Image (spheres, rainbow, N blue to C red):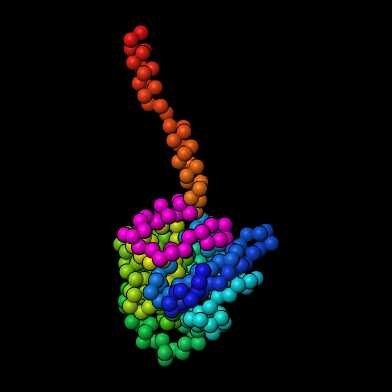
């Protein structure tokens, strides 16, 4: 990849490798996220390397080789203040109420109460959480938990948000509302968004870049439009489920094994004559 070809990269992954003792992990991962194509779908099977890549971005893991750049600068702890992680449904903070956790999240980023108090109140109203202020996450529905987690993310003023299965367990209306919020964050506030999800059909109208990962390596990386590029499911099957050569071989095998219908007709006709 020629890194100079992309204008205004916000995040650049340059040949990142992080392998574990058993050999699993990620190898030579290279792609970038620009200001223009800033809603990225990171798609792959369980164990493909998506979580490892995100943990490397957030410095939970240290890459054995390669480099991550944020706005052209090598990734450092100072950049983590610009980043926020939206966990999956199984990793919500069980012992906090939603306001405590939002304040905790802000103060972890060295944001003072006088800087976040007004914004916090406005976000509470926007996310329809007024009546749930003292509620702990364990007492909330799936949709309420997602909105409460989003509260704790947005109060920190992030420039980069990574979301792990953000719409899992939501009903249709809640999913559509969540997607509209993400589009607003990306389009109007120019926040870079990375989404991992197994629900690839609903990502089609949301993302504008897709990165497919298989066995710890990138197998497809390009800007994405449903109208121009077609269904994500087709891309996924082409590059993850099968390679292009495998697809050709499978199609040929299916053709070779296809029943000879005309022979069947002849057999049945002959039986009728008998």
- Residue stretch in magenta: 210-239
> Measuring 40% from the left and 72% from the top, which residue is drawn there?
38
Left or right, residue 272 beside residue 5: left
Residue 227 included in the magenta stretch of the image: yes
**Can residue 18 be seen?**
yes
Front residue of 48/28: it is 28
**Can residue 141 be seen?**
no
* Horizontal and vertical percent position of residue 214: 53, 57
Residue 38 included in the magenta stretch of the image: no
> Measuring 33% from the left and 12% from the top, which residue is drawn there?
272
Residue 40 picture quarter: bottom left
Q: Quadrant of the C terminus?
A: top left
148 up-or-down from 270: above or below: below
Left or right, residue 58 beside residue 257: right
Residue 263 picture quarter: top left
> Measuring 48% from the left and 37% from the top, which residue is drawn there?
253
């Amino acid at each position: 990849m020629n890194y100079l070809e992309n204008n205004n990269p916000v995040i650049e992954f340059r040949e990142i490798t992080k392998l574990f003792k058993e050999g699993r992990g990620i190898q030579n991962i290279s792609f970038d996220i620009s200001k223009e194509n800033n809603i990225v779908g990171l798609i792959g099977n369980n164990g493909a390397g998506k979580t490892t890549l995100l943990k490397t971005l957030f410095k939970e893991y240290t890459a054995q080789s390669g480099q991550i750049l944020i706005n052209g600068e090598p990734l450092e702890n100072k950049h983590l203040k610009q980043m926020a992680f939206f966990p999956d449904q199984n990793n919500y903070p069980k012992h906090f109420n939603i306001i405590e956790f939002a304040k905790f999240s802000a103060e972890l980023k060295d944001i003072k109460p006088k800087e976040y108090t007004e914004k916090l109140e406005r976000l509470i109203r926007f996310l329809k959480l007024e009546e749930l202020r003292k509620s702990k996450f364990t007492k909330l529905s799936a949709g309420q938990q997602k909105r409460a987690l989003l509260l704790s993310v947005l109060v920190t003023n992030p420039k980069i948000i990574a979301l792990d299965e953000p719409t899992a367990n939501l009903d249709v209306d809640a999913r559509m509302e969540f997607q509209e919020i993400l589009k607003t964050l990306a389009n109007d506030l120019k926040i870079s968004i990375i989404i991992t999800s197994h629900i690839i059909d609903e990502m089609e109208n949301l993302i504008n870049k897709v990165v497919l990962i298989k066995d710890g390596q990138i197998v497809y990386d390009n800007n994405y439009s449903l109208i121009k590029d077609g269904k994500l499911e087709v891309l996924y099957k082409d590059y993850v489920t099968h390679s292009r050569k495998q697809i050709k071989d499978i199609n040929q095998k299916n053709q070779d094994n296809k029943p000879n219908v005309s022979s069947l007709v002849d057999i049945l006709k002959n039986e009728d004559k008998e």
